[in-house]
Image (spheres, grey):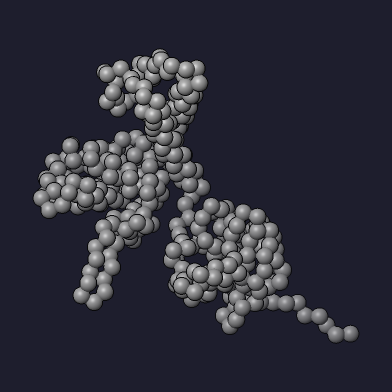
Amino acid sequence: MSQIKQLDFSGHTLFCDIDVHKKNWRVNIRSKEFELEDFSQDANVDIFYRHITRKYPNASFKVCYEAGFSGFSAQRWLAEKGVNCCKVNAADVITTHKDQRRKTDKSDARKLCEHLQSNRSVGVYIPEVAGEHGRSLTRAREKIVRNQTRCKNRIWQLLYFSGLSVPKQYETQQYWSKQFVDSLRSISCGSEALQTALLLYIKDYEQTRSLLLEATRAIGNLCKQQEYKSEITLLRSIPGIGLINAAVILFELQDINRFKNFDQLSSYVGFVPDTNQSGESNYDRGITVRHNSYLRSALVESSWQVIRKDTALLLKFKQYCKRMNRNRAIVRIAKHLLSRIKYVLKNKVEYEIGIVGG
């Protein structure tokens, strides 16, 4: 009776890519020599893991999937099982025009697997779970702020469209106080239908404002926790950075030491130029569109305040304004501010006003 040998892929490395979707995954598996498998499965990381470990026992796996809606849960689950898994930015994967015009899940999975096999793939940073949850909270607040702005704009649009006006003392109202909201509620609209529409918009605004207050308090409580308190204090020592922006900066950066140098940090934030050079032609398209929108917005917002309190940055701002407009100048100041934030966080020292360097 012949002896049945157990399969053993020890010493072999297999490359796996997952094209992630809500209900199903497209999986492509390759060895160093050629493609082994391409199949679809349910969107379940446990099913994927059981398949590769049963069919290729003792093999070493390198797995990747695109960063997107699915978050980091699959990566963390596989990492706990000892599988080398990373998430890649889809914009970093080399794609031909032909691939773009004939895009399928199969071609996406195969393309990512070849990208992983080529050793050109650089995975995105995987944050700690607590840091990721803190970032989700600050981003939720930012979305509520945008919703509140939309609520205000809907009310103004209704008033203008219907020919209604608020009392003159409130025409240029920037902050919507309770007194101002009460004045909106008391406007005579001329019909019950229009009055109801206005009251519904006001109710929507008040509910959104209540959510914003709740989110702000939650961020305040989070920043008081021991693991974040010292870094928040360091960030708030910088004039112009309040509690909310300090939380946004901290949770978007996660770990300042993950950036090898300032150029890498600037690229992550989006303070690098977008250029197009060909021969003697050189087109400057401003700063890159690839950026962390939450972090860059927080830095620019804080920069408008810091130039009012730090004379060194005020002087730099005035110098920039001599050769560019104010909006471009403040972006330059935001990059200086980012440099100071890096120094403060890495060296664990509070900010000093009036320092020229950076």
For residue 83, say whether it is visible. no
Residue 330 at x, y = what percent? 21, 47
The structure residue drawn at horizontal position 34% and vertical position 39%, both measured from the top left corner, is 245
Q: Is residue 127 rendered to the left or right of residue 59?
A: left
The structure residue drawn at horizontal position 38% and vertical position 40%, both measured from the top left corner, is 247
Residue closer to the observer: 323 or 224: 323
Above or below, 245 relative to 356: above
Q: Looking at the figure, which quarter contains the N terminus?
A: bottom right
For residue 282, say whether it is visible. yes
Residue 223 at x, y = what percent? 40, 36
**Residue farthest to the right, as pictured:** 1
Residue 109 at x, y = what percent? 57, 68
Residue 139 found in image quarter: top left
Residue closer to the observer: 57 or 276: 276
The structure residue drawn at horizontal position 54% and vertical position 62%, both measured from the top left corner, is 65
Q: Is residue 356 rendered to the left or right of residue 93?
A: left
Residue closer to the observer: 220 or 188: 188
What is the total number of numbered labels drawn onto the structure image?
0
Residue 102 found in image quarter: bottom right
Residue 145 at x, y = what percent? 41, 35
Above or below, 236 relative to 94: above
Q: Is residue 48 rendered to the left or right of residue 147?
A: right
Q: Is residue 54 rendered to the left or right of residue 187?
A: right
The structure residue drawn at horizontal position 48% and vertical position 50%, both measured from the top left corner, is 128
